[in-house]
Structure formats: C-alpha cells, structure tokens
Amino acid sequence: MAWGALAIACVGSRLATTVTYIEDPDSLRFALSVANEYDIAALQPHFPGYPVFWAAVELFYLPTGSFSAGFSLVGGLAMAGIIWAMLRFREVDLWSVEGTAIAATAFFCPLLWIMANRYMPDLLGTAGALAALTLLVRALRTEDAPLNERAALLGIVLTGLLAGLRLSYLPLVLVPAVWVLACSQRPGRLFAAGTASVAVWLVPMLLDTGFWTLIDVAWGQTTGHFTEFGGTVQTESDLSRRFAGFVQGLWADGLGAWWTGRHPLTILVGLGAGTLSVAGGWRLWRRGTLWRRTTWILGTCALLYALWIFFFQNVVHKSRHVLPLVPLLLLVIAEGGATVWHRGARWGRGALLGVSLAYAAVTLVLVAQHMEPTAIAQAKSYIQMQTQKHSVVRVASVPLVNNYLRAQEVEAQYLSIEDSSDVNRLRQATTGRTLVVGTYASLLNRPPDRTHRFYHNPHVNRMWSEVTVYVYRADRGEK
C-alpha cells in the first residue's frame, strides 16, 4: 500500500510537470528517436544509442501518443526506483523515520525532479545504476558469509542492462561487479547472465543499425567526445573551472543550495544541507557504519565515478553528469534529518521542518521554471515568427543551433558561421533579413538593427542559459 502510494505520487507529480517543448539539442535527439525514427547513424539519439531507455519511453509513447508524457512517465517510475534502491541500501522501512527522510529528500531533490521531465536517459540510468549497486553490495555485504548468489545474479543482469541504458554510468558499478565475479562460486553462470542481458539490447541494435555502420558511428562519436565536443579535460583543461563545475553540480544544482546570484532562500537550504550532512556523518561514525565493508565499497564506487566524470565528462556546462552521486549524498543528509528528529527537541524539529519547507519551495520554483521554454526554445519561437512574417530569412549560427532549428521545421536559409563561404554570402545579401544566433555581433561588419536576448535560470539547465539573436535588415528602410 505504501509503495503504491509512493509510486503514484512520483508518477503523478512528474506527469503534472511535463515539459512540452524541446529545451536543447540533446533533448531533441531523444525526442526525434521516439516520435520519429530510431536511427543512431542520424544521431537519433547519439551513440551509444541508449536502446533500453528508448524502449521504455516507446512503451508509453505508443498508447498515449505523447512523447513528452512518455518521458515523464518513465521519469516518475525512475524516481520511485531511486527511492527503492536508497531504502534497500540502508535496509530501512519506508514508514520509519529514516525511510521517510530518505523518501522526502529524494522526492523533492531539484535535480532529480527536473531530470525526470527531461527528454534524457539520465534519471532512469541513475535508477538502474543504484539498483545494480545495491544488489551487488548486498551480495558482498557480510565478510564472513558466502556470497549472496541471488543478489549477485540480479546485480550482474542489471549491470548488463545498464550498459544499454546509460553506458557512462558503468564506472559506478564496475568495482563491485568485478568483485562479485571474483568471489562467486559460479562465475560462469554470472558471466553468462551478464552477457545475455547485454545481448538483449545489443543484438536488436546491431540488426537495426548494421554492424559496420554502428562501428563507424561509435568510432566517430567516441573520438569526438574525448577530443572535440565532449567537454573532457582535453578540451576544457582548466582544472579549477572543472572543479567549480563539479561542486556547483552537486551543491547548487543537485541540492538547490546557495550559489552566486541565487535567491536568499537557497542560503537556508545550504545551511540545512551542510548541518544535516555533518549530523548524518557523525551518526554513521558513532554507529560504526563508516567502518563497514559496504561503506568502503560504496565510497570506492563514488570516488571512481567522480574521477571519471571530472576528467572525461562535461561537468563545466552540464550538471546532469553528477546525477548518480546525488542520491548517495542524500542518504547522508537524510541520516542527519532522522538524527535531529529522534532527538525530539522541539526547536530541532521546528528547524528541520523549516529547512524542509525551504528545500521543497526551491525545488517547486525550479520545476515551474523548467516548464517554461529555455532561452534557445524562446529564440526558436521568435525566429519561427520572423519566417512567417518575411519571405526571405537567413539564420546564421553554429551547426548545432542550425540543426536544432531545422529539425523543428523552422523554414529558413541556414548558414554556418564556421564556413567562410557562408559568411561571404551573408555579407553580400541584398534582400530579406538575417538573424544571427549567438554572440557574433561583428559578423556582418556593421551594428545590428535590433538585438533580442532570451534567458532562463541556469540552475534549471546550465546549457545556453542566455541566447542572443541579432537582426539585420538588408533594406534599412524595412520595418
């Protein structure tokens, strides 16, 4: 009964905050793969294809006819799965003080809620990674007892599925997966189960895409990620900036705590999160939890994943990469909340309720802002309006922006600012109007006739939180 109510709350709340616009190019690729055609070669979605996530969303899209609702339904179920994994890891009941604290902190976590509505696989991937991690750690939980083969089997199967759900989350479960295989009395059985769970999604993907096509796409996207467009340490080499982005992702975006330029209410959230983290860590220390084998395994997994994303993911511009670490941090915060509640002091419980209300308020504001178009989506609406008013409209920007607009059927002539011949055509245009998207005001060697700037809260989506559109009229007398 309790779990049914929680699942309904998770799905219903996320469905009520469904996003009905395309907020960035990453979301566009997944939307096209569900509503149009699954085609990895056309980057719908980009490699590694995320076939398990695509199948889950497609399962809800087909009966509802709404891909946006399909993403939210999957996000709501993923949210329930994350809470389940957190409770099972701590081995507490949902209706206990500890269980209620865990469920509440996860339910109202701003990053978890926002990602439940995004057209992205990250939240379902987090649920899968945490479930696999919980089962694998449970298999290794007692040092003196033999391996829990049933938990090990389920954990390995989920690890295989995770590779087709969110491949970049594998470092989080790599250590316990290898450990389980090494400790099992039936490693062949576990290896076969893991291979079968990979084959479930890999074989259909190979048949759909083609072996050599998939190899070509995989090579191009993988090398591009690490050397060109992935935001890794090779392309964003400033370690201090990477560290600031990592901390901001966990602290500000993940917990809704204070950061430069944020509302004063986030200061209260930050003070509460910091205080409860200390209280939770102290309680775990006093109970000896920090010295248990499972805690060291979990810490190793978190450290390995943190190093992986710090050096090889775009932590500067995309906070979603820290997502699997957020529930682990929430476990400590929830432990602190339960500690304060158990002490029974009226002032302590009052302060806890105050912080909880501030935490929920910050999240609900961010979720409401997320339902409003992002800066690039606002710019898209403006450009679309211009194409309806004028017969000749040129759009000049980077290829990523041009593809974003073209895929949404914004009828215009698209020119790349990275192509010198396109730039020459722009400067020689004598009719119509030119719209330059991005900070390229000097592109046409004259000031723009009009400038439009579009914004959204960067703590909702850090990508392109400000987009500028410069308007140039070929005929200066045109209105």
Image (cartoon, rainbow, N blue to C red):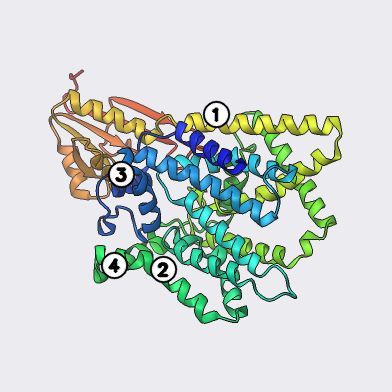
Judge by depth and name the residue closer to the eye, 60 or 46: 60
Circle nearer the viewer, 4 or 3? 3
Give yes or no for contact between labels 4 and 3 (Cβ–Cβ under 8 Å): no
Q: Amino acid at mark 4?
A: Leu
For mark 4, give the secondary structure: helix
Task: Determine which quarter of the picture holds residue 62.
Answer: top left
> Seen in the image, is 229 located left or right of residue 428?
right
Say which of 318 and 339 sits in front: 339
- The residues tagged by marks 3 and 2 sit, at their Cα atoms, a distance apart of 25 Å
Q: Position of residue 315 (x, y in %)?
A: 52, 52
Residue on which the image places disc 3: 62
User: What's the amino acid at mark 3?
Assistant: Leu
Instruction: Tell me the tag on residue 206.
Output: 4
Q: Which mark is residue 365?
A: 1
Q: Is residue 55 left or right of residue 419?
A: right
Residue of label 2 = 198
Q: Residue at x 32, y 68 (%)?
A: 203
Q: Rounded to the nearest whole Å, what is the CA distance between mark 1 and mark 4?
A: 43 Å
Return the disc, 1 or 4, that comes first in the chain's sequence. Answer: 4
Mark 4 or mark 3: which comes first in sequence? Answer: 3
Label 3 vs label 2, nearer the camera: 3
Query: Where is the N terminus found, in terms of image quarters?
Result: top right
- Give amino acid for label 1: Val
Q: Which comes sooner in the sequence, label 2 or label 4?
A: 2
The amino acid beneath tag 2 is Val
> Callout 4 environment at 10 Å: few (<14), some (14 to 19), or many (20+)?
some
Q: Are marks 3 and 1 in contact (CB under 8 Å)?
A: no
Badges 1 and 4: C-beta atoms under 8 Å apart? Answer: no
> Is the residue 436 above or below the residue 217 in the image?
above
Q: Residue furthest front?
A: 1
Q: For the residue labelled by badge 1, is the local secondary structure a helix, a strand or a loop? A: helix
Does 72 sit above or below residue 193? above
